[in-house]
Structure formats: structure tokens, C-alpha cells
Image (cartoon, grey):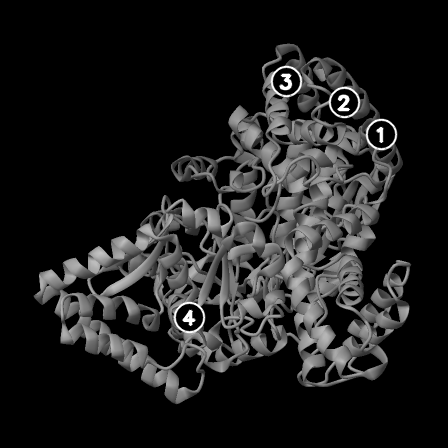
Amino acid sequence: MQDILCATYRIQFQPEFTFFDAAHILGYLADLGVSHVYTSPYLQAAKGSTHGYDVVNYTKVNRELGGADGHERFLEALKKRGMGQVIDIVPNHMAITGSENVWWWDVLENGQSSQYASFFDVDWDPAECRFGNKILLPILGDHFGRVLENGEISLERDQGGFFIRYHENLFPVCPRSLAPLIARAGEDISSRELLFLADALASLPQASASDRESIRRRHRDKEVIQVFLERLLNDHPETARRLDALIAELNESPDSMEALLEDQNYRLAYWRAANQDLGYRRFFDINSLVGLRIEDEEVFEESHRLILEWLREGIIRGMRIDHPDGLRDPSAYLGRLRREGPESWILVEKILQPDERLRPDWPVDGATGYEFTNLLTHLLTDSKSREALTGFYAEFTGETREYGEVLEEKRLLVIDSLFGSDLNRLTTLMLAVCERHRRYRDYTRQDIFQALREILAVFPVYRTYINADTGWISDHDRRIVTAVIERSKKNAEVDPVLLDFLGDILLLKITGEIESELVMRLQQLTPPVMAKGAEDTAFYTYNRFIAFNEVGGDPSMFGIDAETFHLRMKEQLKTHPLTMLSTSTHDTKRSEDVRARLAVISEIPQRWCESVRRWSARAERYRQNGLPDRNTEYFFYQTLVGAWPLEEDRLLSTMEKASREAKTHTSWTEPDSRYEKALQSFVSSVYSDPVLMDDLGSFVKVVECAGRINSLSQTLLKLTAPGVPDIYQGCELWDLSLVDPDNRRPVDYTLRRELLEKVRTMNEQEVLLDMDSGSPKLWLTHRALGLRRMMPEVFGEKASYEPLEMYGPKSEYAFGFVRNDTVAVVVPRLVLKCGGSWGDTEAGELEGTWKNVFSERKHRGPRIRLGEVLERFPVALMIKES
């Protein structure tokens, strides 16, 4: 198996792209130069899953992807090609739809007496006593009483098993709750056997019993009872008929059905109740994804058994850890994982703010490349256009606020609309803390709720990593908490004394069991609040320049200089030389080539502003009563220019999602049909307007070529900078994808395989003549990866990185670096502003003779003229000749 990490290639498995399909393309990927396939999660997921992050069974391979047989075929194909595998794993949560998740099904059936009750992050003792020992399941389309009286909930029997049905949703039945029904059937037909089984069911330990012996006895006895009941019903049809008749009678009586449901270990509720009353931790705001208590040793072992087996057998080379910020103690989890795989390549999906770095105590090789993605976009952006584009955004949309103001507003919005139940649980904990401290016992639930709400709204990072269980806090986290408390005091409605008290708890100055639980729980809530408030809301409402609105990005920034990029790369080489380098992922809202094209707008701000004014004037006839709003319209024009040409249905889908995510006029939970119809009509009308589309097409032609050169620049930088480059599926050619599901469309690998065969024998000028097909990008990728394979030590974790100085009149438009004093990289930036000639601009100091991998030309240092090195191909990759 391949151990040298040359490059990874991300594959998104789904029912339409299985293990067999993946095995079929490995030859092409190997020829391209990929060393490791980087896969989306493929343990058993919910039926029909298109992404794999909704795992229902950690012990099996997803049958919809080909199951164990398909997986074996995939592994054999990897081995044949000498390739390795990196797998995406999901330790934070599981999907809880239907009976596929046997752990969750058992919890619903047996409550705290389930052998898996400790696996899930469930609050069995909530603030509201009506939910005591019950799990709220907010899945009903209307209020419970209406749904019940409409006959939408029923009891059904399958052999000796029983379940509750609500449309396509199934739920188990608590065995004890069946005792009255079984007893009545036994009395009706004078069946001693049924009466005996009814008594046995009634004698089962209560579902609230959580001691080991009660759990063992309940599970043993209920299984025996079910076997006897199933046998009895199969052997005596008349008994089965009587029981079924009673079930039908129960289903006709709302009162009887309600009584049965009251005896369950869960409470079916209107879906809107989730925002205030949910009793389990979720992944973000998704009710069907329940949090796991991965900090529990048994939970870790059961959920990682198969993954660790593959790790020990050498089947997988590395792991991408999804959403570690959701875990109670990420550091402890990662430490355990590292001990299990001391040589494994471990990456964390950690979203960092621009001035934030990975925790030095985490035993990982790096993150998944979000920060690199954003650095590249800013490097290709003209920072001098900040004022012009900011001013025009305010003029066109009326939005004059800074991004920080928008972000805080949107975080408050999602706290109130999505995370009320989570905040309520924190409030209950804090109330209990206040009761223990007489100076604070008079604070009301509302006082505490508002204080916690304010802290969540102003938290500047995804989370801190204070370990209240062990009493550890870093200086970095201490500074963050102190700043958060001071920032929260700006809200005059929140008592500053209460905030100081909360600060002391978070800083571990005041300790205790409940205090520790509050600290740990708060840190698990800040990430979803940030993610939903920023990425999934503010990023769709602050539309000044949407190329910056990417995961891990900061829309308030506007470009960086070469020195900043170099400093980050040198730092990266020192701390995490094997981190992943990405330009597109399944999470990016725009593909690398869309962003590369949008960056060109920053070079021609005046022309852009004039064009938007012209398009908007033409499109005014298509607006209905002022809809859509100007902010959405501005987002629309940027999307059109970035992704053109694209099909109308893709555009409509993207605009609908963007508007719902923005949560300004419509949303996923409160869709406004009037607004959405007006938006759809506007988009379709503009799309069908030949005059407007011709005008927009003319603008695209202005930026398209420069955008493609930007794409070649960022591709080469990714393939040569410190770290391990990743290629997202299909992006070895031009890819103008938008936010998911658009970026999960099928990839034409037949085309790519044929094109690779074609370009392998072409020179740089020949591939440039085939620009529209994406040949230059594919050719560059193949050549650069070939060099990485040939000279792994030049790009490895011990290889040096030195900035390449640029001299002359156009030095600001060129960027480069040298790896290990052996390979030099030169790329252009701000291509339109640079113009066609480099004049006397040079790169240096490059002692000796250097051979351009792309043009085969040789150049002698110490200064190399850019006009020569970039004459035949837009970017240069040079090897020093010995």
C-alpha cells in the first residue's frame, strides 16, 4: 500500500456512485498521479443517504454502496494499483430515523433501562417534569392532539413484535405497556398462555431502572417473552385474530391510543417543539442526528471497532475526523485515536478563524484545508478595491453595516429560532449553580437565559477547549473568555455581575460538578451557533463579495499580500507540514473555479459596478412589488457571473437555498411562498432575457480567461505548497459548481480518462489551444503530481519553503516560492491589471540553471525574467539542475 502521501482525491459515495464505480476509476486516478483515495463516510447510513454523515450502524459497510462485497472489490482494486485510502469518520452523532439504528431503537423501547442508554447525549432529567424519563421526538406535522384525532398514529403488529406508526415513521413499543392489551386478549378467549405473558410483561423492570442487574433482567426476559408470544400467535391463529381485533379497536380510540403512548419512553410532538423542548444534543439543528457520548469508553470502542480494525490491518492510511468540535473533550478523543494509530494520518475538520491556529496539544497532522482555500482566494484578490466594492454594495443594497454586526444579529436569530432547547438546558444548569451560591440565587431563569444568550452571540471562535473535568485551561482560552465577558457587558439588558460570575465559572475559578457540566456543555453549543449563524446565515446575507463567504472564511477581510501568504506557509510547515491543502470540498459554497473567476471582479471594480447597474435597470421590469430585495439581487449577479454558463434549474435551486439560508424573507422552517414565487419568476425572467444575458455573457468573457489563469495559479500553489494536496472529485477540469447538492453532481470519468490520455503527449502550447475542455488544468495537475511522486523529499514534511522575491515594474503581480532549494514555483496574480507584458520583471534569487517542467525550457539565474519563464504557459514549475 502507498505510504507516501503524494495527493488525495476526494470521492463522494452515494447510491448512484458505489464501491464498484470507485474501483473502476482507480486506474485513471493512479495515472493522474493520485496516491490516496479520500472517501466520504461509508459505514451503514440512513436509507438513501447521499453523503454518509448520517450513520446508523458503525459495525457494517453501507449496503447501498455495495456492502461488504463491494468494499472488498474496492480494496482489491486499491491494492492492485498500489494506492492507499483515507476515510472520513463521524464520531459526533448518529442518524435516528426508523429501526436501522438498533442502538437508538433499543433506547426508545427501554428508556434508561436500555443497554445503550449511556451511548447517547440525552437529558433524562429535564427541567420540565412532564418530559421526565422520556425522549421528546418532534416529528409530527401538527399538534399531537390533532394528529392523534385524525387517526395518523397507529399500533401495528409484526409477528410477536409491536410498533407505533406515524406515516412512514416507526417507533418501538415499551414491552411493559403491552401488558393490558395482552391481558385483555387473554381474558376474551380464556388463554392462560396470554395471561401468563401479560403478567410477565408487567413484571419487567421499570424503564427508569438503570442499574446493571435490572437492565440485564429486562433485556433477557423481554426477549424470551417475545419468542413465546410469537410462537403462540403462529400456532393459534384464533389468538392472533383476537389480538389484532383489539389492536384495531385501540387504533379507533384516540383516548386508548393516547394512554398507550403515555406509557412509552418517548413523547411524540409537533416538530416546532424541538426549538424549546428537545432533550438530546443534536448535530447543529438537525433533529434526526443525535449526539453520541464518545467520551464514554464503551461508546468509543463500539463505534470505532471496525475503523480501528481496518487501521490495524493497513486497509486505511488515515482518517478525517468530522466535527470534532461537537465532542465533549476533543483533545482526549484525538489522543485516544492517536494511540490506536500512531502512524496514521489524522486530520480534523476544524474551522479556524483567520487569526486562530490548531491547538498545539492535539496529536493530529493537520486540518482539512479550509484556511488554505481562503488564503488562496484572498491572494488572488486586489485588496485595493475594498473601498470601491464596499461602497457600491452599500449603494446598491442599502446594507451599510460591517460584517461583524451582521454576524452578531444572525447568531442571535439562530439562537432564538434553532437552539432554544439547547439554551434552555444550559439555563437549567446555571440555575442549579446559582442555587449553590447564595449571592446569585435570586437571579431568575430569564436573567440567566439572557446572559448565556449574549455570550453565545458574541463568541469570536467556534469554541474553546477548557477541560473542566480535569481543571485545565490554556492562556489562549482564558483570553477568549475574558474578552467574551467584557464584550457581553455592552448589552445593558444583561447584569454585569451575573456575567462576571459566569466568567469565573468558565475560567474555572469556581468549580463543582454542576459548574463543570455547564462549562463543558456551553463549549459544545458555541460551534453550532457559530456555524448556523455564520456559514449558514450571515454568509448568505452579507454579500459584498461572495468569493470570501466560504467555510473558514472571514467576509470582513479583503485580500492579502504575498508576505502574509508566505508567513502562513512557513508557519504551516513548522507546525503541521502534512496538513491537507484544499481548494474545493463537499462543503464549499462555490467551487475553486467559481471563486477564481469572481476574484477577477476585484481588478475591474468600476466596470463591474457599471454592469450591475445596467443589469439591474434592465431587470427592474421582472421584480414584483420590490421583490426580490437588492441584496438577493446582488448575490444573484455574482452567482451568475461566477458560474456561467449554468442550467436554469441549477440556478433556481441555488437561489432558493441561498434565500432560505439567509432567513431574511423566507427560510426552511418558515417558507414564504409569495417571496419565493417572486424570486423564481425574477430568476427565470432574467435567465430568459436575451439582451440581459448577452450583456452578462460579454462581461463573463472579460473575466473568464483571467479566472482560468487564477485557477491554474491556485492549482499549482496547492500542488506544491507545504502540505498534502487534495483534489475534489471532478475538479481536475474546470468546475463551476455551486453549493451542495450542486457540487455532488455525477462526474464524467470517461471524459476525464480520455482527456488524460490525450494530454499526456501534448506540450504546453497544444493544451492551451484546448482551453475550454479544461485540458490545461488537467495537464498541469498530471505534470505537477508526477514531479511530487518523483521527488517526494522536495515536498515532504522536512522540505524547506522560501519565498521567491520578485523584482521590477510588475513584481506585485507575480508570486512564487522555492521548495527545498530544488523546485521553484512562479504564478501570476491580478492578471487583468498586470496586462500582457512582464517587461523587466524578474524572479530571484535562483542560483544555477532551472528547467521549466511545463515548457521544457532552461533558465539561468540568479535572476529569471518572467516574460521568458511565463511566455509559453501561464504558470511555471521549475527544477534546479545539478
Q: Residue at x 72, y 80 (%)?
A: 515
| 83 versus 191 height, above or below | above
Q: Earlier in the sequence, mark 2 or mark 4?
A: 4
- Which residue lies under the disc numbered 3? 686
Disc 1 element: helix
* CA gap, disc 4 and disc 3: 53 Å
Query: Is disc 3 in contact with disc 1, using a CB cutoff of under 8 Å?
Result: no
Disc with the residue nearer the chain's start (2 vs 3): 2
Residue receiving disc 2 = 612
Evaluate if marks 1 and 4 touch, with contact meaning CB atoms under 8 Å apart: no
Point out which mark residue 107 bears: 4
Real-space Cα distance between discs 3 and 1? 22 Å
Tag nearer the camera, 4 or 3? 4
Residue mark closest to the camera, 2 vs 3: 3
Q: CB under 8 Å between callouts 2 and 1?
A: yes
**Dot placed on the residue nearer the N-terminal end, 1 or 4:** 4
Give the alpha-carbon distance from disc 2 to disc 1, as whole Å.
10 Å
Q: Amino acid at mark 3?
A: Val
Residue nearer the viewer, 151 or 213 = 151
Which residue position holds label 1?
A: 392
Residue at 79% across, 34% down: 602
Viewer-closest of 536 and 323: 536
Amino acid type, callout 2: Val
Q: Give the Cα distance between marks 2 and 4.
A: 56 Å
Query: What mark, if any, has residue 577 been given in the picture?
Result: none
Q: Secondary structure at mark 4?
A: helix
2 or 4: mark nearer the eye: 4
Looking at the image, is mark 2 or mark 1 earlier in the sequence? 1
Mark closer to the chain start, 4 or 3: 4
Amino acid type at circle 1 is Phe
